[in-house]
Image: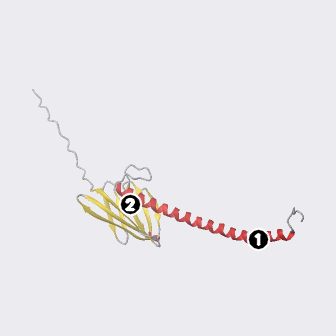
Amino acid sequence: MSKRHAFTLIEVLISIVLLGLIIPALYSSVNLLRDSNAHLFSYVKKAQKITKSTEVLFLDIASSDGNISLKTEEFSRVCMEETKNSLYALGAPKVCWLVLKKENTLVRVEGVAYHLPLLSEENVEVDTIMSNIEIFNISRSQDKGQSMLLVLLKQKGKEAISFMVQGIDKPKKREKKVKKQKPKKALLG
């Protein structure tokens, strides 16, 4: 027997055919994995946005001065007359969360001393939070001078989100300070 130093042409052709069968299968597996990662990244990004939105709503309510007005029609509208949570570095902004009729879009409105509906000279910042809202309901419960707010939020085709904010003090009425007058000295003649 003689020693073999090279591959025959048939062996090389067989290995090329086998690689031709394996490489497309590997490519489709990598492509499937890439698509799966893209869908996962998209889902995580949306989940982070929803989590951030509910966190901002929670902080708006929890940081408020307790003067919270609720209006319930098809969707709730909640306004905090003064909150410490500002996205635009305002001192004590008024913040309202409401659902616009166009595409049932949930928005956050931040400004100083504005009224709804907005007047033309009022300056506010409006952030679009999410669209296709099915439920935006906020209910209040009073207990021993403190409010509890239950928030229920549901976007079409998504799971409902709910949370409760407890321990909101009722707004204290600001008392006007009465200045004490000093008695006038009588003039001696």
Residue visible at 62% across and 66% down in the picture: 33
Residue position for label 1: 18
Choose top left, top right, bottom left or bottom right for residue 20: bottom right
Total numbered badges shown on the rendered structure: 2
Where disc 1 sits, the SS reads helix
Q: Note whether residue 92 is visible.
A: yes
Quadrant in which the N terminus is drawn: bottom right
Residue 163 x, y percent position in the rendering: 37, 63
**Residue 136 point in image, percent of width and height:** 39, 68
Identity of the amino acid at label 1? Leu
Disc 2 and disc 1: Cα gap in Å? 66 Å
The residue shown at (69%, 71%) is 25
| Nearer to me, 18 or 99 | 18
Using the image as rendered, state which of residue 99 and residue 168 is in the foreground: 168
Residue drawn at x 49%, y 63% as measured from the top left = 47
Q: Which residue is mark 2?
A: 96
Tag 1 or tag 2, which sits nearer the N-term? 1
- Which amino acid type is shown beneath numbered disc 2? Cys
Left or right of residue 147, residue 74 in this image: right
82 displayed left or right of 19: left
Give the class, few, some or many, for how many residues have Cα within 10 Å of label 2's Cα (few <14, many ≥20). many
Q: Relative to residue 172, is residue 105 depicted above or below?
A: below
Residue nearest the observer in this picture, 77 or 56: 56
Residue 181 at x, y percent in the picture = 17, 38
The label number, if any, that marks residue 138 in the structure image: none
Is 125 displayed left or right of 68 in the figure? right
